[in-house]
Amino acid sequence: MSDQVILTTGIYDMIKDHVRRKKVTQQEEALLLEELRGAKQVRRRELPNDVVTVNRRVKIMDHTANKEEEYIFVSTDKKNNKKRKSSILSDIAVATVGRKVGDIITWPFRNGEKKIEILQVEAFHQA
């Protein structure tokens, strides 16, 4: 697992604001603040292609439930559950944003702790 998350400055600020507004649990808040303290901030064009961020299709293995799931992380105003587009501030996005392919994360979701692995990350372009 990567020791350091890599975030664009915009996503960094968005997550910091999300935490400040108390939109996450206390456990998530502690983990997110720790990650933000050590985060590497980069410009959008400098962000590696295998890092989870907005406008990326992400395949995740939920080791706790033993199933693969795919998400498309988009800006909060573009989310559409029918098209499987999740907000970059959804629980699964917040848990994985800034992480890269191969990372395994244990995260305290609202419905219990899960162990998840990032299997694939690719660009997603709005149609």
Image (tube, grey):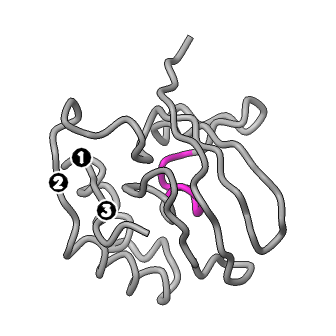
**Residue at image coords 73%, 64%:** 62
Element type at marker 3? loop
Where is residue 95 shown, x and y percent of the image?
51, 65
Near-viewer residue (109 or 123): 123
In the rendered view, tell whether residue 69 sits above or below residue 95.
above
Q: Which residue is mark 1?
A: 8
Would you say 124 lies left or right of 53 here?
right
Would you say 54 lies left or right of 15 here?
right
Residue lying at the far right of the rendered structure: 66
Calculate the distance from the C-alpha at mark 2 to the C-alpha at mark 3. Answer: 9 Å
On whether residue 88 falls in the magenta region, the answer is yes
**Residue at image coords 65%, 45%:** 59
Near-viewer residue (42 or 61): 61
Residue lying at the far top of the rendered structure: 127
Where is residue 57 shown, x and y percent of the image?
57, 35
**Residue at image coords 36%, 66%:** 2
Q: Earlier in the sequence, mark 2 or mark 1?
A: 1
Element type at marker 2? strand
Q: Amino acid at mark 3?
A: Val
Q: Which residue is mark 2?
A: 41
Q: Which residues are magenta?
A: 87-93
Q: In terms of image quadrants, where is residue 12?
A: bottom left
Where is residue 99 shown, x and y percent of the image?
41, 57
Q: In terms of image quadrants, where is residue 84?
A: top right
Q: Which residue is mark 3?
A: 5
Q: Amino acid at mark 2?
A: Gln
